[in-house]
């Protein structure tokens, strides 16, 4: 067993999002230029679309440029780059959770904890922040962010670093 296991982000997914996000900016600008709606509606809807599109473009390009791993496991705990390190003693259990057609890794914490995101809210940070606001104690790691690694293999690797880790039964939503 090595000192740590690093799961890099999927470059193909990052490149796809970075390439597609400017398309949505262009679509928002075209929406503003359409003559069929009144100017206030075009500015309100198109402007909202433009702000969201520019934000998504900035986040996707930042992820592509920063090239940080999506997940790091070691003897101390779990590191998700946008969050603080989650030490093993704070993890009550892990499990696979089926959401739609795919499975995600769910890290269930012993206590509810506020998270201070180090980057803009996206991915597990957004999920953890929303989850904590609702009083839940779980962080979801999406399979898209961890591709091409299987969620099952990640659970097994977590158990290698923390043998007493409880793996709860798979749950479907």
Image (cartoon, helix red, strand yellow):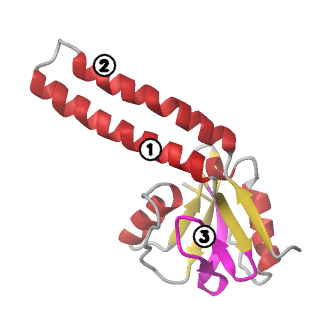
Total tally of numbered discs in the picture: 3
The magenta segment is 74-97
* SS at circle 1: helix
Categorize mark 3 by other alpha carbons within 10 Å: few (<14), some (14-19), many (20+). many
The reply to whether residue 134 is visible in this rendering is no
Q: Residues within 10 Å of mark 1 (few under 14, many from 20)?
A: some
Q: Which mark is residue 58?
A: 1
Q: Is residue 89 magenta?
A: yes
Residue lying at 82% horizontally and 76% vertically, measured from the top left: 3
| Residue linked to disc 3 | 107
Say which label, 3 or 2, has the lower sequence index. 2
Q: Which residue is mark 2?
A: 30
**Quadrant of the rendered image containing residue 18:** top right
- Residue beneath the point at 58% across and 48% down: 65
Q: Is residue 71 left or right of residue 43?
A: right
Image side of residue 106 versus residue 156, left or right: left
Q: Quadrant of the C terminus?
A: bottom right
* Residue 81, position as x, y percentages in the image: 58, 65
Percent position of residue 103, x then y: 65, 52
State how far apart marks 1 and 3 are (Cα): 28 Å
Q: Which mark is residue 122?
A: none
Going from N to C along the chain, the mark reached first, 1 or 3, is 1
């Amino acid at each position: 067993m090595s000192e740590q296991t690093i799961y890099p982000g999927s470059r193909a997914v990052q490149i796809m999002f970075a390439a597609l996000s400017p398309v949505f900016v262009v679509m928002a600008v075209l929406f503003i230029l359409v003559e069929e709606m009144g100017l206030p509606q075009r500015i309100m809807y198109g402007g909202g679309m433009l702000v969201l599109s520019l934000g998504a473009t900035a986040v996707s390009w930042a992820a592509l440029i920063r090239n940080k791993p999506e997940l790091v496991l070691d003897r101390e705990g779990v590191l998700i780059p946008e969050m603080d390190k989650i030490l093993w003693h704070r993890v009550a259990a892990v499990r696979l959770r089926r959401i739609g057609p795919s499975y995600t890794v769910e890290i269930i914490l012993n206590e509810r904890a506020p998270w201070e995101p180090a980057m803009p809210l996206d991915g597990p940070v957004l999920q953890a922040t929303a989850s904590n606001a609702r009083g839940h104690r779980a962080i979801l790691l999406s399979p898209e962010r961890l591709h091409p690694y299987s969620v099952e293999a990640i659970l097994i690797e977590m158990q290698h670093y923390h043998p007493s880790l409880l793996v709860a039964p798979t749950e479907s939503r």
